[in-house]
Image: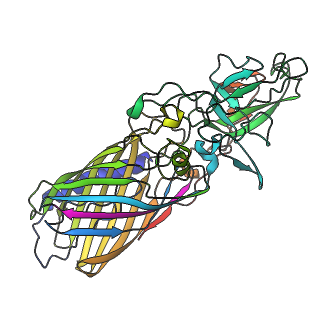
Amino acid sequence: MRLATRALLSALTIFVLTAAVSAQTLRSPQDPRNQAPTVGTGGPVGGPTGLFTVYDGDTIRKGEFTFSVAYSNYDRDPGNVDIVDTPLSFNVGLNDHVELFFKTNGYRGMKVNNPQNLSSFYLPNSQLFFGSTLRCSGAAIIQQPERVSGSTLLSGFSPVFRPAGPPCNVGGQGFVQFPFIGGVGPNFGLTGNAIAPPYVSRIGTPFGGNGSFGGASNFPGMGSPVGSILPGIVLATAVLPCTALTGNCRPPANASPQSQLLIPTTFTIAPSYLPDAPFINRLYGESSFTDYVVGAKIRLASPNDALGWGFIPFYRWYPDKANDFQGFNQMQRGAGPGGDIGDFGLIGFIDGRLSQHVNVAANVGYILNSNPKSDAMGGAVLLDRPDEFLSGVGVDYSVNKHFQLIGEARSTIYSGGRTPNAFNNNPVDAIGGIRIYPARWWGIGVAYRRHMNQQDEGHFNLADSNTQAANLSGVFVPGRGVVIVPGTTVPATNGGRPNGFNFSDDPNGFIF
């Protein structure tokens, strides 16, 4: 990923310098280059004139307008998620320097191929498949829940191992619907006996959180120890026999002796999430009109100069938020992150005509993203969303006024203060395609799109032998405490591959 990003930034610099040195003034009725709105998706917003996702240096003239309908398929990680967006856009020339635009995402479909890699599938109203038919809540690392009755054994520990359950294992999280608070939490297998009452917990009231642009709240019994409603995930577990070193596996005055001890071996303390849809819990989710964007493309250079530059301010907001069941249900179908007050973006663009047929464009920008909050949960901040640093370069070749060849490379880097993402992926995309104009006032385009740094096997440093894990790094296992067993090792990886981690295998997408 670092190599791909560095290569993109280097290419951006080279293209900008080349455009600045070689730009030629070519603006006439015989100019073979046509204007069209961008599709965007996967980071940049669509609507302003440009290539497929890269904005060029031109603006439409006063009184002119464009309308566009597109179908964009692309892939994102973690989760090996295949996304289809259908952006609809309209823009109009206010004068020869400014065009105004509006964009909405009319339809979204999201197919999650590796749900085990996403924390959203470990929420209390979610289940995973174990085998072909057995479903239950996945094993996770959570903040300690609120105790209702039974042992006080969990007091003083924050990261707690929640086993899969029920019915897969005794002790896991049962099904609880949004807004979750006050629902029955996991009992960790502490079922009690004739003398001592069973351990009963509940999902606690969230606390903390710093509003629309600060840290996430804490969610007892449900969320990650680092904050947010999303838990850490457990990819693999192992069973240790009860010995003098591991203990007798019996919680004090709370359960019968056990013959073995279930522990997590490959796990994350921080959550793993898809920044654009952090709460999705459907293997295939559909939603509509998932966001709205308004903005302006402002060209600072003369309309007839071959070297053009300017900036694009925009505001993006989301109709679906976590204020009620209906809104959160749409977010769990992939509708979006539900930012509280919306997002604010500013993109700078520069381009130059190298010849009558060749044009080079480059973009750099930043999007300040607001956090999702929930009125149904007392105003709790569900996640501290990352901001986005966008960059891209594009080259187009106008064969004649009917055919335009386009090549692009672009990157999205998640930055700023945010909830840590255990499997963060800063996507780098390569796009190549063609636009066909039967007439100068309308056209169609098609492009191939590839996710260059998906989380496949090449994403990891592979080894020839297993890497062993000797302890749980401070995670509390109910019935034993923090398991640190000298001289005992448990495999956490296999040949450098984390046990239980599902690799991505389809980087291919397209735009129409």
Q: How is the image coloured?
A: rainbow
Horizontal side of 235 relative to 380 (left or right) equals: right
Q: Is residue 425 above or below residue 144?
A: below
Q: Nearer the viewer, residue 181 or 115?
A: 181
Task: State the count of labels.
Answer: 0
Q: Is residue 78 visible?
A: no
Query: Could you tell me residue 407's position as x and y percent?
Result: 33, 66
Horizontal side of 500 relative to 443 (left or right) equals: right
Q: Is residue 68 above or below residue 46?
A: below
Q: Is residue 286 above or below residue 356?
A: above
**Which region of the structure is painted magenta?**
80-94
Query: Could you tell me residue 266's position as x and y percent?
Result: 67, 37
Query: Could you tell me residue 329's position as x and y percent?
Result: 56, 49
Where is residue 249, by image quadrant?
top right
Indicate whether residue 232 is drawn in magenta: no
Query: Could you tell me residue 283's position as x and y percent?
Result: 62, 55
Q: Nearer the viewer, residue 12 or 313?
A: 313
Q: Is residue 148 visible?
A: yes
Indicate whether residue 92 is drawn in magenta: yes
